[in-house]
Amino acid sequence: MSGKRQSYEAGHRPKFMVVVDQTPECSRAIHFAARRAARTGASMIMLSVVEPPDNFEWLGVGEAMIEEAQEEAQKQLENAASEARGAAGVEPELAIRIGDRAEQIIKLIREDEDISFLVLAAGSSKDGPGPLVSTLAGKAASTFPVPIVIVPGSLTDEEIDALAG
């Protein structure tokens, strides 16, 4: 990171960032971040990352696959934004990136100096907390540019409301 976060400087507002994906626990992160953003006067940004297909042998096919994935990501983001509005009246900023998920998360955080927290939800299955939590909160945690908030995926809306305000 090239400089300090600007979240609390004049003309800036802190942002809670949520990565939107198809995991069942994603809604827990959205609910928590929306409630905290509303409670603290912060804003919210939601990111969906489209990972390009591994095989670009047929370039036209790969481009079509990415375009289709972007359309699906946009629908997921719109549904997630509706969830944030319903949970706390928050109107989130939406972003779609193409590339490796972990790299794109870090890149967006570095580009947007108002992002103060990354909010993730841990899966509650026996398979563990999920790949994103394992990757970002594991070995990368000591060098990550912002604090990572991990919401247990088993929390109910009411339990999150009691914690987040």
Image: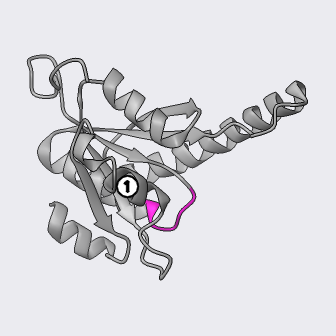
Quarter of the image that includes the N terminus: top left
Count of numbered circles on the image: 1
Q: Position of residue 13 (x, y in %)?
A: 18, 28
Q: Height in image: 112 above or below 156?
A: above
Magenta-drawn stretch contains 29? no
Determine whether the residue tagged by mark 1 lies in a helix, strand or loop.
helix
Quarter of the image that includes the C terminus: bottom left
Residue placed most toward the observer, 15 or 147:
147
Q: Is residue 64 left or right of residue 44?
A: right
Color theme of the render:
one colour
Q: Position of residue 73 (x, y in %)?
A: 61, 42
Q: Which residues are magenta?
A: 22-26
Residue at image coords 53%, 44%: 77
Q: Position of residue 34 (x, y in %)?
A: 29, 51
Magenta-drawn stretch contains 25? yes
Task: State the residue position of label 1.
Answer: 30
Residue placed most toward the observer, 17 or 5:
5
Q: Is residue 61 left or right of residue 90?
A: right
Residue 3 lies in quadrant: top left
Q: Height in image: 131 above or below 102?
A: below
Residue 28 lies in quadrant: bottom left
Q: Position of residue 156 (x, y in %)?
A: 33, 76
Residue at image coords 31%, 75%: 155
Residue 7 lies in quadrant: top left
Q: Is residue 72 left or right of residue 1?
A: right
Callout 1, which amino acid?
A: Ile
Q: Height in image: 13 above or below 161?
A: above
Q: Main secondary structure of the magenta part?
A: loop
Residue at image coords 33%, 47%: 140
